[in-house]
Amino acid sequence: MTLKADLLMQIENILGALIYLVGVAGSYFRFGKYERRGKLDALFMICITWGYCSIMVGLMNIAKYTLVPSLHLEMIRVLYYGGAMASSFVFFDTNFSSAATKSKIAASLLMGTMAFVFWEALVFYLDLPAGMAILSCVGLLVIYIFNLWQKKNMVGILTGVAMLLLPILPKLNQNDLNIDKMHMKREIAIRNLTESNSELKHKQELIVELSK
């Protein structure tokens, strides 16, 4: 497995892990003392949420160098930290209805991250047009929404399944799912990705040396 992490990613993951541990340790201590003081407990929960999202960004970086080389980590960050931001407001909300709505928005943003990764994989491996891949991902979100935002509705769920499979079925009918071909494509893309990163790092080091 090849993994490349720039300085930002390393700092992000280390801080995320520390913040997550602070949140878990603080929540555990508070639970053990049977004391709940509102804002302090909310801060520990926020630490857990932001730390978790930072760790997940790191895992998505691993996925980029092992599964989906075309993955755009900038978009992953926006979705994960957007979900963390929405979750942060939940812990300070005293109105149950408002908190429930914010919680669903946060969960949808986090689920949107998985849908985005799925979209990248469809475009990369199956060469689907971006619009068709988006339709498939929207179907995935529709299935999720009818299980989260509303009571389970089979019509809505089946509609989502149809949207999910519609762009993929033509590829299945054409027997385009060549596992060896997809594996080779992934290996070439990862090799090009690591080589380009190495060249960029070398150029940055050269610029630093010349500037001295």
Image (cartoon, rainbow, N blue to C red):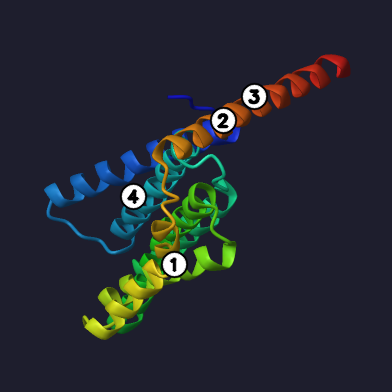
Tell me: residue 131, above or below residue 185: below
Quadrant housing the N terminus = top left
Q: Which residue is mark 2?
A: 188
Q: Give the mark toward the camera: 4 or 2.
A: 2
- Which amino acid type is marked by label 4? Ile
Q: Quadrant of residue 161?
A: bottom left
In what element is the residue under mark 1?
helix
Q: Which residue is mark 1?
A: 136
Q: Give the mark toward the camera: 4 or 3.
A: 3
In what element is the residue under mark 3?
helix
In what element is the residue under mark 2?
helix
The first of marks 3 and 2 along the sequence is 2
Q: Are marks 1 and 4 in contact (CB under 8 Å)?
A: no
Residues at marks 4 and 3, CA–CA distance in whole angstroms: 35 Å
Badge 2 local density, few (<14 within 10 Å), some, or many (20+)? Answer: few
Q: Which residue is mark 3?
A: 195
Query: Where does residue 94 sit, x and y in percent of width and height?
Result: 31, 77
Query: Where does residue 75 sit, x and y in percent of width and height?
Result: 56, 54
Residue shown at 36%/78% (left/top)?
Answer: 101
Residue shown at 40%/73% (left/top)?
Answer: 163
- Which amino acid type is marked by label 3? Glu
The first of marks 1 and 4 along the sequence is 4
Residues at marks 4 and 2, CA–CA distance in whole angstroms: 37 Å
Residues at marks 1 and 4, CA–CA distance in whole angstroms: 32 Å
The first of marks 4 and 3 along the sequence is 4
Residue at the right extreme of this rendering:
211
Residues at marks 3 and 2, CA–CA distance in whole angstroms: 11 Å
